[in-house]
Amino acid sequence: MISESFIEYENLRAGKFGFYVQKRGLIEVSGAEAVRFLNGLITNDTAKLESYEWMHAAFPNAQGRTLAVARVLRFGEKFLFETEEATREKVFNNLFRFTFAGDFFVEDLSERYSCVSLRGSDFSNYKYKIPNENEIFAINFREAELFSIKSFRSNGIDVFVPHAKVEEFVEELSDSGAVEIGEGAQEILRIESGVPLYGVDADETTIVSELGIEDLISYKKGCYIGQEIIARIHFRGHVAKRLTGLVLSDDSTSGLESAELKSLDGKNAGRITSAAFSPALGKTIALAFVRYDYLAEGTLLKVDEKEATVKTLPFVAQVR
């Protein structure tokens, strides 16, 4: 029997675009000392961020391990931290504790907005501009202010819509031919794009550098929490392990959750974190932390009796 997730996925590949509504953390930071405080907390350099642009950043602890990954959006002198719902509280608490130390203000806007994520291969029926790589595009929708950014590692955009306008915006998308994407298809798209999920593919045991997200870390700005560990790893040349992709030799996902990876000569090579069958590739794919010696693309590894080939992320940058 063909699953509903597969049908939704095939609709996207057939030239449609789809959407799903998700809850995300959205924390606003403002004040004359915002840049100074922020640069002491996160891995990237907010001073270099232009208005209506965004960048990735992580909140590390003192050991350089990941508390949260966020996208930092700048609107003039204000910043928005957009993050997973699972890490919203951590981000807010990390920021709020400095509000008594200077001209630095923090407000949680998470309950005011929903994130409408659009994915697919053809956005010709979408009536608004598609943002460039790090651009923020403002949308005036029926007297409401929306904003959109390009999604990470995939063909799509994320639109942040005030709760009062979500139903109207979704109705407009549906009238334009967009199809709703269920959780099963969402998970396939996430893994194909190589997007780590906090609590599944990363947690507080994960060193920020191990995530393998390009432009997540600035090695030229001043000190921040966890910098010494992260910089030491960078300047010694490499991490001990990194999140990467695997293509499996058969189409079953059974038994892959947290499965150990081994080299062809039986040595521990890492651990799988997420897996799904990719209709685009016709194979099972997985996200995994792989030890440095085995990270080269094309390296063959073993999961029980299955072969797994290392693949640089993303697997499928665009749904075609």
Image: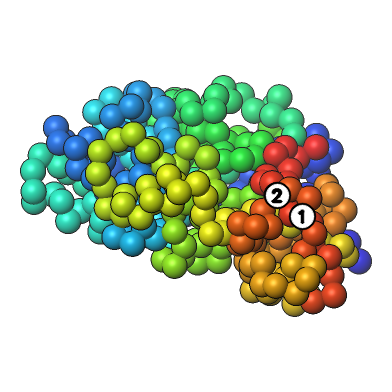
Residue 1, x across and y down, in percent: 91, 66
Residue 216, x across and y down, in percent: 45, 42
Can residue 191 be seen in the rendering of this structure? no
Amino acid type of the residue tagged 1 in the rendering? Thr
Asked whether 1 or 163 is in front, the reply is: 1
Residue located 38% across and 51% down the image: 232
Above or below, 106 against 206 in this view is above
Residue located 84% across and 65% down the image: 307
**Residue under numbered circle 1:** 299
Q: Residue furthest right?
A: 1
Asked whether 307 or 134 is in front, the reply is: 307
Above or below, 37 against 252 in this view is above
Residue located 35% across and 55% down the image: 229
**Residue under numbered circle 2:** 296
- Number of numbered markers: 2
Pointer 2 and pointer 1: residues touching (CB < 8 Å)? yes
Q: How is the image coloured?
A: rainbow
| Secondary element at tag 1 | loop
Asked whether 45 or 191 is in front, the reply is: 45
| Secondary element at tag 2 | loop
Residue located 77% across and 64% down the image: 301
